[in-house]
Amino acid sequence: MASATQRVTQLGELTRTDFWFADGNIVLVAQHAAFKVHRGQLERHSEVFRDLFSIPQPEKEDKIDGCPWVELHDSPSDVLHLLSALYDGLYFAKSSAANFCAISGVLRLSTKYMIEHLRQCCLLRLRHDWPSTLAGWDLREKEATDCLGRYAPRECYPHPILVIQLASELDLVDLLPAALYDLSRYGPRKIVSGTVPPHPYWSTALDAKAGEEPARICLSRQELCTTLLGREASQRYLAAFIDKELSARKVAPGCAHRADDNGRVCRESFYFIMLNILRSVGGIACGRDADPLFSLVQAVDMLSRTDFSDGTKQCALKLCGSCKAGFALAAARAREEVWTLIPEWFGLKKPSKPTEPSRQ
């Protein structure tokens, strides 16, 4: 049952892990780490392990702590997370960036060793955090905003580059639109600089030199070009929306102010909304300046806000009900269109039309 390699055959050459049971009957070796576990537990959940253990072994095989052993060509951290899920269960009470090591590790190995219930559990969590629907995205963004209005996505969700690489590795293409869109909201310098790798649960001096910072994880040249081009496309869309729906917007047919200089009050309000969106696009709204979905929500929120100032007191925009309804509908249609265009912007789908708001 042992690997042909004789690189490690003695327990003293390995690092004993937390998964070392006195009554264990099989030792898994992953690089420098050893796990003494129960053969039946692995066979019960995985046909791959069952087939692996059924291979006849030489009578005179080396043993570790009196048990046969098998070498796994996986990272120690991934193996530890897989065993933890098999023995203790896999639970994610809420979205947390700290869970990514466990999710990614278990997903890799549950896919490789065909442990379907763990694989589905990981996919369910990932697809909640990186959804394929606009309603799911809005829920995700709400969960990343606390009761004080502070937006902290990196506390809830891992850096999108990590998800992009995992999705590419395991062919999880449905995660890519949300992950690429999330990444595109960073400034170009941050996109290029990449991210630090997540801190693994299993870490020893054999994994990295003491005091040495781990190499940053960066996009490939092709992935970088794709992300930056998608970012540019999203900004062109928002600029086109501003031009078509705000810059010279006509008042609604039923505008209550139409008799007053052809709805001057409503037209001035639309101009005010346009200025605020342009400020956001320019980067004043820190961290959300390349996010057309959020900018369109902000624009609609302005219709009901009462904290603007006319120079002497706080007040609301003086838009009439018909003009408010018309603009809210246009913004809602635009958000739906943005979501359908994201796969095209990031090269996941062939373009079907120009990247600009359609006229409804």
Image (cartoon, grey):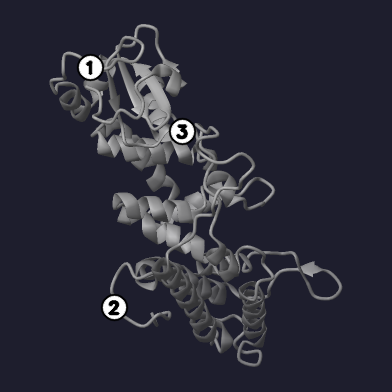
**Quadrant in the picture for residue 211:** top right
Q: Position of residue 21 (x, y in %)?
A: 40, 11
How far across and how far down the image is residue 248, in percent?
A: 56, 89
Q: Which residue is mark 2?
A: 352
Mark 1 touches mark 2? (CB < 8 Å): no
Query: Which residue: 38% across, 58% down?
Result: 176
Crowding at dot 3, Cα within 10 Å, few <14 / some 14-19 / many 20+, comes out as: few
The amino acid type of the residue labelled 3 equals Phe
Q: Nearer the viewer, residue 34 or 132?
A: 34
Q: Nearer the viewer, mark 1 or mark 2?
A: 1
Q: Is residue 268 left or right of residue 310?
A: left
- The disc, 1 or 3, on the residue closer to the chain's N-terminal end is 1
The label nearer to you, 1 versus 3, is 1
Q: In which quadrant is the N terminus drawn?
A: top left
Within 10 Å of disc 1 (Cα), the crowding (few <14, some 14-19, many 20+) is some
Q: How far across and down, in percent of the image, does residue 268 sit? A: 67, 84
Residue at position x 52%, y 44% in the image: 198
Mark 1 sits on what residue? 61
Vertically, is 245 above or below 132?
Answer: below
Horizontal side of 45 relative to 308 (left or right) equals: left
Q: CA distance from mark 2 to mark 3?
A: 39 Å
Amino acid type, callout 2: Ser
Quick check: can you spot residue 89?
no
Of residues 109 and 339, the one drawn nearer to the viewer in this rendering: 109
Q: From the viewer's perspective, tell me whether residue 284 is left or right of residue 17.
A: right
Q: Does 245 sit above or below residue 170?
A: below
Question: Which residue in the rendered view is the most extreme toward the top?
Answer: 23
* Local secondary structure at mark 3: loop
316 or 86: which is nearer to us? 86
According to the image, label 3 marks what residue? Answer: 92
